[in-house]
Image (cartoon, helix red, strand yellow):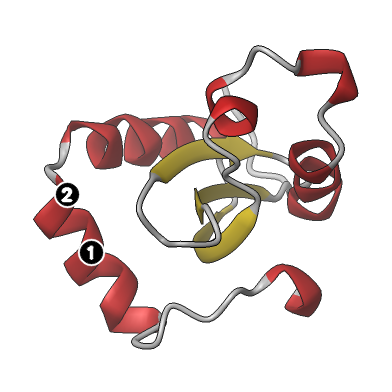
């Protein structure tokens, strides 16, 4: 039997400074993950590094890892227009949220 805990998981969307590229990821520590996206020495060949996706523009919080992974996969299947609509629902001006985490 699986017990419910107080775990935290996040599905997040990053963009580059010009807001032309979207990167979707999942993590259990959003602040730490943002640090690694902004200091990519160890993973310089990653998609987010290659396209300079460092700016947090959207995130969702989950308590179960399976729910977060399911949501991440769902968002990755969406087209750009649908992703943009989602971002606009919570962050209409696409403000960079890195400093709010």
- Location of residue 83 in the rendering, given as x and y in whole percent from the top left corner: 23, 56
Q: In the rendered view, would you say 99 is above or below 33?
A: below
Image spot of residue 82 (x, y percent): 13, 57
User: Would you place residue 1 above or below residue 28 in this image?
Assistant: above
Q: Residue furthest bottom?
A: 93
- The residue depicted at 79 percent of the width and 45 percent of the height is 38
Residue 84 appears left or right of 1: left
Crowd rating for badge 1 (residues with CA inside 10 Å; few <14, some 14–19, many 20+) = some
Front residue (pair 13, 3): 13
Disc 2 crowd rating (10 Å Cα; few below 14, some 14-19, many 20+) is few
Question: For the residue labelled by badge 1, is the local secondary structure a helix, a strand or a loop?
Answer: helix
Residue 18 percent coordinates (x, y)? 45, 62
Considering the image in quadrants, where does the N terminus appear?
top right
Q: Is residue 43 left or right of residue 47?
A: right
* Mark seen at residue 80: 2
Q: Nearer the viewer, residue 65 or 49?
A: 49
Q: Which residue is mark 1?
A: 84
Numbered badge on residue 72: none
Q: Secondary structure at mark 2?
A: helix
Residue 60 percent across, percent down from the top left: 49, 61
From the viewer's perspective, tell me whether residue 39 is left or right of residue 94: right
Please report the residue visible at 39 percent of the width from the left and 46 percent of the height from the top: 22
What residue appears at the point 31 percent right and 29 percent down from the top-left corner?
A: 73
Are circles 1 and 2 on residues that touch, CB within 8 Å? yes
Q: Quadrant of residue 43?
A: top right
Question: Which of 77/8 is in front?
Answer: 77
> Considering depth in this image, is 4 or 67 the residue closer to the camera?
67
Rounded to the nearest angstrom, the CA distance separating label 1 from label 2 is 6 Å
Placement of 23 over or under 55, stated as above or below: above
Residue drawn at (76%, 49%), measured in percent from left and top?
Answer: 34
């Amino acid at each position: 039997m699986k017990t419910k805990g107080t775990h935290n998981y996040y599905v997040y969307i990053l963009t580059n400074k010009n807001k032309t590229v979207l990167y979707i990821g999942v993590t259990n520590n959003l602040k730490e993950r943002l640090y690694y996206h902004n200091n990519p020495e160890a993973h310089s060949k990653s998609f987010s590094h290659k396209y300079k996706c460092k700016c947090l523009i959207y995130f969702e919080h989950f308590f179960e890892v399976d729910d977060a992974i399911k949501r991440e996969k769902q968002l990755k299947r969406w087209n750009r227009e649908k992703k943009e609509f989602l971002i606009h629902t919570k962050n209409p001006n696409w403000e960079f949220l890195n400093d709010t985490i």
